[in-house]
Image: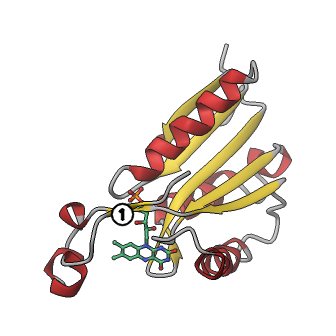
Amino acid sequence: MKPSFLVAYATSSGSTLEVAQAVAETLQGCGLESEVLPAGKVKSLSGYGAVVLGALLYMARWLADARHFLSRFGGRGPLASLPMAIFALGPFHNKAEELQSALQQLDKELAKFSWLKPGAVEVFAGKFAPGKLSFPYNLILPLKKMPASDERN
Ligand SMILES: Cc1cc2nc3c(=O)[nH]c(=O)nc-3n(C[C@H](O)[C@H](O)[C@H](O)COP(=O)(O)O)c2cc1C
């Protein structure tokens, strides 16, 4: 039998995966079985009773695998009738104005899915690892020189 919660995530540098694992541990601490899977690898939602979907924000977009997850399973699919929570990782600093701006970016992305009625939508401060920047961002010198930070709670 599948665990009752699916925690699906999309990450670029790994910090969103760690948050997804922390979410799953919290659920397990409440006695709720959960499974953590990359959003792009989920083949079916059958057997799950609820879904948590998390991904980072990148250049004001929510990572494609998370958006594709909503397209693949939403609309007339199973996701529309499952309880769901959504989170995004974004700002480098845990400051109200940065979190608010990231929430606006996320809301704009979610508004494209008219059927979507998540029970909770949260934005968390993220992690910046200059050594893990992917192409073409690893070529942007001012970005590479920014200090590493991790403001995840
Ligand atoms: C090149 C670049 C662009 C980013 N763009 C945004 C953005 O538009 N909005 C935001 O809130 N966070 C942005 N971030 C912050 C990331 O979402 C944050 O670093 C996150 O923790 C990365 O998650 P990951 O380790 O799972 O890939 C950006 C980070 C990088 C490196």
Residue at the (65%, 19%) spot, across then down: 2
> Which residue lies at the image location 47% right of the left edge and 51% below the top edge?
16
Left or right of residue 76: residue 28: left
Where residue 26 appears, x then y in whole percent?
Answer: 66, 31
Q: Amino acid at mark 1?
A: Ser
Q: Quadrant of ligand 1?
A: bottom left
Residue drawn 51% across and 81% down?
A: 60
Colour scheme of the picture: secondary structure
Left or right of 136? Residue 111 is right
Residue 69 location, quadrant = bottom right
Q: Give how far across and how far down residue 98 sits, in percent.
A: 58, 79
Which sits in the foreground, 110 or 129?
129
Is 2 situated above or below 117?
A: above
Decide if residue 44 is in sight here: no
Quadrant housing residue 102: bottom right
Q: Residues within 10 Å of mark 1 (few under 14, many from 20)?
A: few
User: In this figure, which residue is indicated by the disc labeled 1?
Assistant: 149
The answer to whether residue 45 is visible is yes
- Outermost residue, top direction? 1
Horizontal and vertical percent position of residue 62: 53, 69
Q: Quadrant of the N terminus?
A: top right
Q: Nearer the viewer, residue 2 or 97?
A: 97
User: Is 49 above or below relative to 111?
Assistant: above
Residue 25 at what x, y percent from top left? 60, 28
The front one of 144 and 136 is 144
Q: Residue at x 78, y 31 (%)?
A: 49
- The answer to whether residue 35 is above or below residue 91 is above
Q: Is residue 152 above or below residue 108?
A: above
**Residue closest to the eye, 52 or 128:** 128
In this picture, residue 73 sits left or right of residue 92: right
